[in-house]
Image: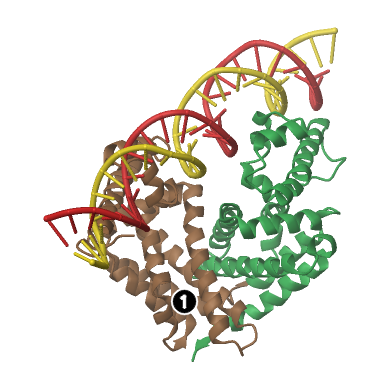
Chain colours: A green, B brown, C yellow, D red
DNA sequence: AGCGAACTGGCACTCAGTGGCAGTTGGCAT
DNA sequence: ATGCCAACTGCCACTGAGTGCCAGTTCGCT
């Protein structure tokens, strides 16, 4: 989690700083020397964190690699109650909420997010770890929706589809975003938000595409 | 791959038999003693296959665990050209093709598929590996569609959404299927096919679900 | 000031997965 | 039938991710 500095207890700030340091060291290193060539042991050395603590901070090496991207989903999951209390088409509500979270990421998020997105493009295992977090979101949304819309038949299935589409739209947007020329230096979160909105508004019609 | 016995060269049949033996030993063992408690080394001992060969046959332990389910997707990917040559709504075409592959799985597939599906429900890492194969399908479909429908703007995005929905529908169907009482002994592929069809026909409307 | 809970580091360990290489075997041309 | 070659196989040593354990530390709270 990219906790804002100056929040919470001394302890939790120390943890947040260690996490941050690890991410800040890891992502450029992955980009430069390759994901596999950078070992967890080396990272821990650099960041002066014990390996044991590393695995207390992150669910694994892949989780570390995806921190910037996953933080978006995680903050969405955290605030899900508020989001699902809104009204309107679920897909729109989720899309808006997603964009909001991206907008609220801490400054400097873009640079790391691009690196993270590139890694997930080249390393299937990392990509898979990313989908896992999304899957957790889906599960939460489905649970909440079945509770809230208990009377509507098939609401759980609908919720699943909407999440799948939201996630697919986000993925498509990120793919485009990270591939823009010189993205690492110049890509902005505003661009990403626009891409997300664009793909999600195209979604409903997209489903009817036909083969000739 | 669940290759039919008696197909191909002597060599490839031996490989297929070794693969099959590993799956047949592994899935019940996973179910009985837990995924983590069953080591690759032990499996290789039992199946009389060297560890080195194990990793030649399977992309990893998770791949082994998902063989029955992944085989469906893999055969779909293999025959994709024929499938995309059909005409009609892409979602329907994909759904039909998916159901066909399930119907054509070798006899006895159900029992292993249920075990596989249960594992993927309890072990996120396995689940993730499963999504990876689906991701490969998506990629292929997107590529093929952009080539075929080069003129239609946003066809690639549409293809992505359709795949996402097809996959989500399949997942939902499998979840229900594997949870039916005594599934391991009694679940049939016909039931699964019905479930898949049912969720996919519900999909287009599902996207419009609203929060109150 | 000092208690208790939460966190930390270090170490040894397990196990998935890989590299390298020598030995074998099936496919195939003759 | 024979023999060659490429593909496959087994074996062994190795790397590196991730975990269990436990004694020591640190912070928050009273």
- The quadrant the C terminus of chain B occupies is bottom right
Task: Find residue D3 and report its horizontal and vertical position in percent.
Answer: 24, 53
Q: Is residue D8 above or below residue B164?
A: above
Placement of the N terminus of chain B among the 4 image quadrants: bottom left
Q: Which residue is mark 1?
A: B202
Q: Is residue B91 left or right of residue B197?
A: right
Chain assignment, label 1:
B
Tell me the residue at 79%/40% (across/down).
A21
Side (left or right) of A172 relative to B77: right
Query: Quick one: B1 or B29, which is closer to the camera?
Result: B1
The residue at 63%/43% (across/down) is A61
Indicate whether A42 appears above or below A34. Answer: above
Q: Do we see residue B212 in this rendering?
A: no
Along the line of sight, the residue nearer the viewer: B202 or A54: A54
**Residue A206 x/y as whole percent:** 59, 82
Residue C10: image location, x then y, percent? 67, 19
Residue B119 image position (x, y, % from top left):
41, 48
- A203 sits to left or right of C12: right
Looking at the image, residue A107 lies above or below residue D18: below
Q: Is residue B146 left or right of residue C8?
A: left
Residue depicted at x 62% and y 41%: A59
Q: Quadrant of residue C29?
A: bottom left
Residue B94 vs B110, above or below: the answer is below
Q: The residue tagged with tag 1: helix, strand or loop?
A: helix
């Amino acid at each position: 989690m990219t906790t804002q500095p100056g929040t919470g207890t001394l302890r939790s700030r120390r943890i947040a700083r260690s996490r941050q340091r690890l991410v800040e060291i890891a992502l450029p290193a992955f980009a430069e020397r390759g994901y596999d060539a950078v070992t967890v042991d080396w990272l821990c050395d650099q960041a002066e964190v014990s390996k044991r603590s590393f695995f207390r901070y992150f669910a694994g090496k892949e989780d570390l690699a995806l921190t910037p991207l996953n933080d978006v989903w995680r903050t969405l999951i955290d605030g899900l109650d508020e989001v699902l209390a809104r009204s309107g088409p679920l897909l729109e509500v989720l899309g808006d909420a997603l964009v909001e979270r991206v907008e609220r990421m801490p400054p400097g998020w873009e640079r790391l997010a691009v690196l993270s997105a590139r890694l997930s493009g080249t390393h299937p295992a990392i990509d898979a770890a990313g989908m896992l977090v999304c899957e957790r979101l889906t599960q939460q949304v489905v649970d909440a929706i079945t509770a809230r819309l208990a009377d509507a038949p098939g609401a759980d299935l609908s919720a699943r589809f909407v999440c799948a589409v939201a996630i697919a739209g986000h993925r498509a947007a990120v793919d485009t975003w990270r591939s823009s020329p010189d993205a690492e230096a110049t890509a902005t979160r505003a661009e990403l938000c626009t891409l997300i909105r664009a793909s999600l508004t195209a979604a409903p019609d997209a489903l009817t595409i036909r083969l000739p």
